Each structure stands twice: as C-alpha cells, then as structure tokens.
Amino acid sequence: MCGRRIHARGFTLIELVVVMTIVALLTVLTAPTLASWLHNTRVRTTADYIQNGLRTAQSEAIKQNRLVAFRLTATAPTANGTLPAAAAAGTPVNYWYAATVPWTTAALTSNGVVTNSNQFALVASGIISSDASQVTVQESTGTIGTLCFTPYGRLTGVVSDPTNNVTTCDLPTNAPPKVTYLVKPNTTDANSHPLDVTVTPGGQIRMCDPLQPALPASPAGC
C-alpha cells in the first residue's frame, strides 16, 4: 500500500496581514463603545452603593427606633474614632456611613451608668468608589450634608439638641421637595450616561434616569 504524504500548511504573510488589519479595524470601531461601557458601569455601581447606603440608614432608623444620619464623606469612618463630617459640595466622595444621631450634649445617667450621648454611633458604612477621579457625586443643590431618617423611615430636619445645636439634619427646599444625588462619569464621552439617586421627604428612595422624561411620563425618569 502506498501512503500519501500530507504536508502541513501554515499562514502566509498576506493572510497574517489581512487578519491583523481586520483585528485593528475592529479594535478602532469598538474602543469608543467599550470606553462608554466602562464609564457607565462605574456610574451604575456608584449609584447602587449610594442607594444601598441610604436604604441601610433608613432600615437602621426603623429597627433601632432612633434618628439615623446618612453622610457621604471623603475619608473612611472608623467605629472607635470621631466620624468624619459630610463632604462639602463639589468635593470628591469615596465613602458613606450611617450613624445614630446624638440627642443631647449632656451625659445621661441611668442606674449609675453614665452614657455620653453626644457622640455619633456608627452602625454601618461602605465604600462608594475606590477612585473618585472616575465618577463625580454631587447633590443637586449643593446644600445637603446630613440626611436623617426618623423611626418611621421619613426624612426629618429637626435639630437633635435645639439648645446647643449639635446636629442639623438637612431637608430639601426645592420643588418638588426631594434630595437628588447626581452620579456622572468624569469624561466628555457623548455616550456616557449619568444617573440620579433620589430621596423624598416621605422616605422613597429610587434610582432614576435624568435624561428620560420626568415621572409619570416615563417610569425610568426622575
């Protein structure tokens, strides 16, 4: 029997050039889409973290039957240290935390035990973004520093200690009244998409699309 000799055939130089040209063209065509996808993913992740933080603060207020504050900060809170103040308007934020609100500046004594109630007590915290240069978080009016939820899950603007003005809880003054955290990418990409996280005085928390028609015209709108 005579066997046939099979010769292995590789790619020619022309074929390799054609393949590399096609790959380069596809890379050029898909790069803007990929960049937009990355930007929008960062925005969505950041908005999710803020929304979850707000809901955590609200649920803790209901569970503990106390005022619970929600803040966005540039530095990480620590359970044993002084909790950071809310980030100023227009400054980068990387963290959120929820803490019970002090109701007096005086120490309370109960059965011989002195309680220093003029300190915030951290109940939960989380990271918003590991790189604030990628995503901007801005409150719509630039005036909301501390949101406080009541034991009923609503926002309140009361001062915890009117005599000494320990903590002022901010309320929205715009119409219709709601707090809006605008989350947007730090890019000029036309395909990048911002998102809003809103809180109404009644305690409704939702994520919405500021580019869609407003409610009730569009369910996704703000």
Image (spheres, rainbow, N blue to C red):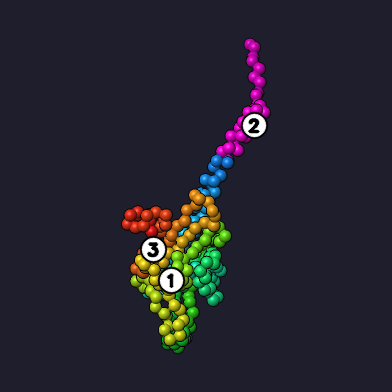
- The residue most toward the top is 1
Please tell me how crowded label 2 is: few (under 14), some (14-19), or many (20+) other residues with Cα within 10 Å: few
Residue 120 visible in the shown view: yes
Q: Which residue is mark 2?
A: 17
Residue 134, how many percent across, how many down? Answer: 55, 57
The amino acid marked with disc number 3 is Ile
Q: Earlier in the sequence, mark 3 or mark 2?
A: 2
Q: Which residue is mark 1?
A: 147
Q: Quadrant of residue 12?
A: top right
The amino acid marked with disc number 2 is Val
Residue drawn 52% across and 45% down?
Answer: 33
Residue 138, how many percent across, how many down? Answer: 49, 64
The boundaries of the magenta stretch are 1-27
Residue 139, how many percent across, how many down? Answer: 46, 66
Q: Which residue is mark 3?
A: 205
Magenta stretch holds residue 10: yes
Tell me the distance, in whole angstroms, between the alpha carbons under discs 1 and 2. Answer: 60 Å
